[in-house]
Structure formats: C-alpha cells, structure tokens
Image: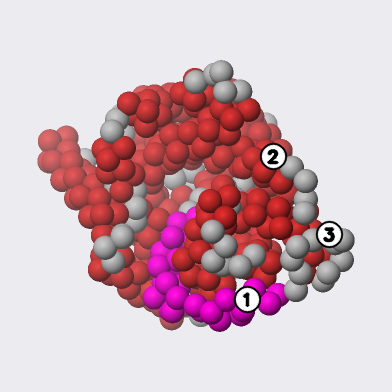
Amino acid sequence: MSAPSSGLSHGLKQRHVTMLSIAGVIGAGLFVGSGHAIAEAGPAVLLAYAIAGLLVVMVMRMLGEMAVASPDTGSFSTYADRAIGHWAGYIIGWLYWWFWVLVIPLEANAAATILHTWFAGVPMWLFALGITMLLTITNLFSVKNYGEFEFWFALVKVVAIVAFLAIAGAAICGLIPGSQVSGVSNLFSHGGFMPNGFGAVLGAMLTTMFTFLGTEIVTIAAAESDNPQQQITKATNSVVWRICLFYLGSIFVVTALVAWNDPSLPLQGSYQRTLELIGIPNAKAIVDVVVLVSVASCLNSALYTASRMLYSLSSRGDALRQFGAVASNGTPQKAVLGSMVVGFLTVIANYLMPKEVFDILLATSGTIALLVYLVIAISQLRMRKQLIARGETPAFKMWLFPWLTWAVIVFICAVVLLMAFRPDHQIEVIGTGVLTLALLVVGWVRSRLFGTPWRRSSTLRPAASRA
C-alpha cells in the first residue's frame, strides 16, 4: 500500500479507527473520578455531564466538517494555521503537545499504583517507567501497533461499561437477589435532585468538561487510515450516542443506586462503590483491572497523539525538522522518541519534584481543552465562510451555521471567565495563560530571527493535499 504524500503509513484499519472512536479515550475519570463530581453536585451532576457532552458534540461536529474536507494528522492545529494565522496553529499545537506529555506521568503513576498493590515488592517508579517504555516501543514500530493495542484496550472498556450498565440496570429493576440497593429513589431522596445548588453543578461541569478531551484524537488517527473522510464521518456521528450511553448512562445508574453523599463514593470511585452495594464479589479487583487497562490506553494515546502533533509542527516549520522525519515503516520515530524523552522526564519529575512544583506544571494544562475547543470553533467559522465565498459546499456540515458556532464560542469564553473567578480554578487559568504568553513570545522572536512567517493567508486545501 502506498504511503500518503506526508510519508505516514496508512496502517490503521477500519476496526481500529471504529473502536478508537467508540471508547479509545475513556479513561479512569469515568470509572473512578466521576465519584468526586457526584459528591460535589449530587444527582444534578447529570446536568454537568450533559452540558459538557453537548459542547463536545458541537465541537466534534465542527472539527469533523474541517477534517472531512481536509484530513490532516495535525488536525485542528493545521486548520488554525490556515484559518486564523500561523501564530494560532503554532500556539495551539504546542499547547496540545504539552497537555499530552503531562498526561504520560499521570497515567503512568495511576497504572503503577494499581500494579504496586498487586506486587508490593516492586517500587512504583519502576512500574511507571516500565509501562511507559513498553508502550513507547510499540509506538515506534508502526501505527498498526498503536491501532491494535487501542482496539483491544477499547474493547475491554466497552465490554466493562456495557456489563456494568446491564448489572446496574438489573439492580434498579430489583432483579438481583441480595442487592442492597434498587430503584431510583437516590436521585431525589437526599436533599433533592440538586442538593448543593446550581453553583455546584457549574463547578462539577468545569471538572467533567476535561474528561472528554481526547475525543478529537480520532481525527488525527483517521488521517493514517485507508479512507479518512469516511472514518471521520462515522466517528463524528457516533459522538452523540457514545456520550449518552457511556457517560450519561453510567452516571445515571450510579446516582440512582448510590446516595450522592455516601462517604465511600469519592474514595472508592463510582463503579466500585456501585458494584459493592449491588453485592458483586471482588468489586475492587474487577474495577482495578478495568482502570489499569484504561490508563494504559490513555498512556498509549498520549504517546501517539503527542508524537503526531510534534510531527505536524515540524512539517510546518514550527519544531526541529528532525521530528518531521518518517521511518521506512511510515512512523515518525524521532517525534515518538522526542515526546517519549519529555514524557520520561515528567514521569521522573512526578517522583522527584515536591508536590507543589509538579502541581504548578499540571496547572499549565488546566484550560488547554477550552482553548482547543475555542480554536476549533473559530477555525470552522472562518473556513466555512471561505467555502461559501468560493461557492463550495462542505460534504459534512456543522448544524445551524453560523448560529451554533457562535453560541459555542460565547459559551467557551463564559466558562473561561467563570474559571477565572472561581478560587479553585484560578491557578489553571493563570498557568495556561502564562504558558500561552510564553509560547507567543518565543514564536514571535523566532519569526524575527529566522524569518518564519507569523501571519499567513488562510486557505482550505483539498483533501488530496493533506499533510
């Protein structure tokens, strides 16, 4: 099979992209972290997940419109470069790369924590470095390895979620003998559906919103498949039912069966606590296995996504040209190794740095998700106008253009302002703001020194010229 013009392999099969789009980015946040959101907002956390999910559906629709027209491994970073200006693609590309590099130590530490409970004699740092090294090696060989790992990782998650929903649904209907819980009374019986007010729902929304980041990875991966346009269309259309089934479905059955103020909920996680109350034996061990697979999947995706964004930045002259090299197997191995080295350093820093220092590093990624969504919306707004001006019609459209696009832009700006005024989120806004400003300064100075164009005329290249 011939490689694309960029040199990247087309090694991802349809089943790889399909499974990646279904559950590739579902992480420990759903199985464990959702317990904290429920404890904060009560059953009304369903509204928080619904609002955040609706935002993601809108953003993915906009991204899908651009990606179908011009599949590109740089995805929204490349579109921002063309639609807004070179500076926008440069900044959002590096911010996104940094986000996924920071995901590596978080997921590696989560995996190491679980493995350490099973094999207490092995130090956690060794597990963290070992699993990072293993997944790095798989990413070096070919994109097919990434796709194969993600296929089985995602399949385990899908089976686990469907099984959980079936068991919890049976418990709600009173069909499981010995279950301590049944019915849906917990949705209203402990202070009502919204026991802590709408402010708590907004706070939970700010937390849950970032659990969806990664949905856009499928547009990056699809560029390395046989039929990018078809795969992107399928993945984008499936976002609605994925969010409804996996996220809203899971949160609904948990809040129906478990009291939101159950002290064990944030400590054990939503899935484990629900299974324990239903009476499923070895609930902790079962959830630990699923969470281990989930964090390994997210770590695998973090390495893949960071390397592809670094490759794309290099191909546009925004990173060392060595990172744009493609090996004979169609893999940007130097970009994988470059991202891996920084990922390893962050894994080591997670164990050596004082917690406060590492928390500051994490804060720099706090609002990157919102900036990514904002850039996607603005890029789609400008690219559609360019198409209309040329008398062209996109094959895959954002709904109710331009009104929904503008609504998304206004909503994202409002959320950023909300975060800026909430003490528990201010450090994230400041951290990301400082990092963005630093990138802006570095990029401007670099353009002055090396003559790199900092502003570029916006054009939507056809799919055949994808990079």
Which of the two discs, 2 and 1, labels the residue nearer the N terminus?
1
Disc 2 and disc 3 in contact, CB within 8 angstroms? no
Q: Would residue 209 be counted in the magenta stretch?
A: yes
- Residue 285 circle label: 2
Give residue 167's position: percent from left, percent from top: 79, 58
Give residue 40's position: percent from left, percent from top: 46, 66
- The CA span between labels 2 and 3 is 20 Å
Please give the name of the residue rendered at 29% of the width and 54% of the height, measured from the top-left corner: 428
Does residue 342 appear to the left or right of 454 in the view shown? right
Between 334 and 421, which is closer to the camera in this rendering? 421
Q: Would residue 349 be counted in the magenta stretch?
A: no
Residue 306's place in the image compared with 163, above or below, is above
Q: Which residues are magenta?
A: 184-211
Residue 282's place in the image compared with 373, above or below, is above
Does residue 196 appear to the left or right of 88 in the view shown? right
Q: Which amino acid, by three-letter code, is at mark 1?
A: Leu
Most common SS among magenta residues? helix
Does residue 331 appear to the left or right of 406 in the view shown? right
- Residue 178 circle label: 3
Label 3: few (<14), some (14–19) or many (≥20) C-alpha neighbours in 10 Å: few
Q: Which amino acid, by three-letter code, is at mark 3?
A: Gly
Q: Which amino acid, by three-letter code, is at mark 2?
A: Ala
Q: What SS does tag 2 mark?
A: helix
